[in-house]
Amino acid sequence: MTEERGLPAPAPAVSPHSAAFWEASAQQRFLVGHCPGCDQWFWPPNRTFCPRCGQAASLREASGRGTIYSHTTVRVSGSIAIDGAPYNYKDALPFVLAYVELAEGPTVMTNIVGADADVVAVGLPVRVEFSRTGGPEDPALPRFRLV
Ligand SMILES: [Zn+2]
């Protein structure tokens, strides 16, 4: 295990449509889209209607557990700017970008943090954690760590 070397956590653009998700993330709660009609979980969570049956969708707190479905290691990266603020991913190299299959079923693109890239493998169990972004509402980015 290694510590992250400053993987940036840019604040997301919070809209009225996504505010409930980000408000929960600031409280370390991981919400996923859910249909109460057919019990389908889905990602991304900001859908108005269930992608399976079309009923009104909602957000529901997920377990935060999952397994690595796929991953890659980013070894070359530049700086990017979001809303004019530069984020330097070079200092965080190498870092892991992955798809995590949640215990509830949906697959989420995310980062695997706290592990050397060469120990990350398909099928390993992970758990969500949150990277604080700062700002007035301090929405936090869901990322995953090996368990
Ligand atoms: Zn449904």
Image (tube, rainbow, N blue to C red):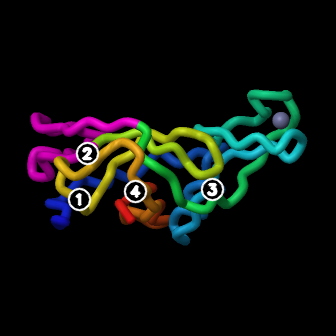
Disc 1 vs disc 3: which is toward the camera?
1
Residue 56 appears in view: yes
Q: Amino acid at mark 2?
A: Val
x, y percentage for residue 81?
24, 39
Q: Which residue is mark 3?
A: 31
Furthest residue toward front: 123
Q: Secondary structure at mark 4?
A: strand
Q: Marks 3/4: CA distance? A: 14 Å
At a point 34% along the width and 48% down the height, the residue shown is: 111
Q: In the image, is the residue at mark 1 within 8 Å of ligand 1 by its beta carbon?
A: no
- Tell me which label, 3 or 4, sits earlier in the chain: 3
Residue span colored magenta: 70-96
Rendered image quadrant of residue 3:
bottom left
Label annotation for residue 144: 4
Query: Does residue 19 appear in this view?
Result: no
The relative height of residue 65 versus residue 47 in the rendered view (above or below) is below
Which residue is identified by label 1?
Answer: 115
- Does the magenta segment cover residue 18? no
Q: Position of residue 83 (x, y in %)?
A: 33, 41
Q: Is residue 4 left or right of residue 63?
A: left
Q: Earlier in the sequence, mark 1 or mark 2?
A: 2
Say which quarter of the image contains residue 22: bottom right
